[in-house]
Image (cartoon, helix red, strand yellow):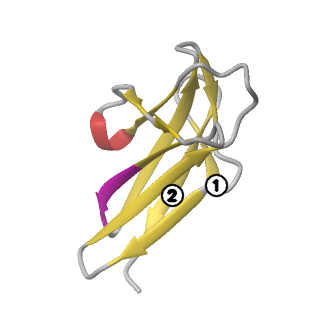
Amino acid sequence: MLKIKKNDTKAWVTFTVVCDAEQECVEIAGSWNDWEKESMKQKKDGSFYITKVLPLEQRHEFRYVLNGNEWMNDADAMEVENVFGSVNSVIELQKG
């Protein structure tokens, strides 16, 4: 799930993953950080979230990593093919 708040030059994007009880950790990796995994925080309801400040007028690709090795896309985001033969989630942050 994605929640986006914008101003003139940047957006605050909150990424949220709702998963079953088997997930011990969820990370996010994306084009904004050269695909380095970042830990997401867990809420009391069991979901995981992180808020990133990203520039507008750019396309940002990302994926979630469950328990260190299972890659997952965001159901609310568009998808684009990647060089590994699978797909990444993508958001295009435009002004307005």
Q: Name above or below for residue 79 compared with residue 88.
A: below
Q: Magenta segment range? A: 51-55
Residue 8 at x, y percent in the picture: 25, 82
* Residue at (34% x, 68% y) in the render: 11
Q: Quadrant of residue 63?
A: top right
Q: Name above or below for residue 81 compared with residue 53.
A: above
Question: In the structure shown, which secondary structural element does the residue marked by tag 1 occupy?
Answer: strand
Q: Is residue 94 magenta?
A: no
The residue closer to the viewer here, 65 or 47, is 47
The numbered disc on residue 55 is none
Q: Quadrant of residue 10?
A: bottom left
Using the numbered discs, state the Cα–Cα distance from disc 2 to disc 1 in whole angstroms.
Answer: 7 Å
Q: Name the residue under label 2.
A: 91
Quadrant of the snapshot with the C terminus: bottom left
Q: Main secondary structure of the magenta part?
A: strand
Quadrant of the snapshot with the N terminus: bottom right
Residue 91 at x, y percent in the picture: 51, 58
Q: Do the residues labelled 2 and 1 touch (CB within 8 Å)?
A: yes
Residue at the extreme right of the image, as rendered: 20
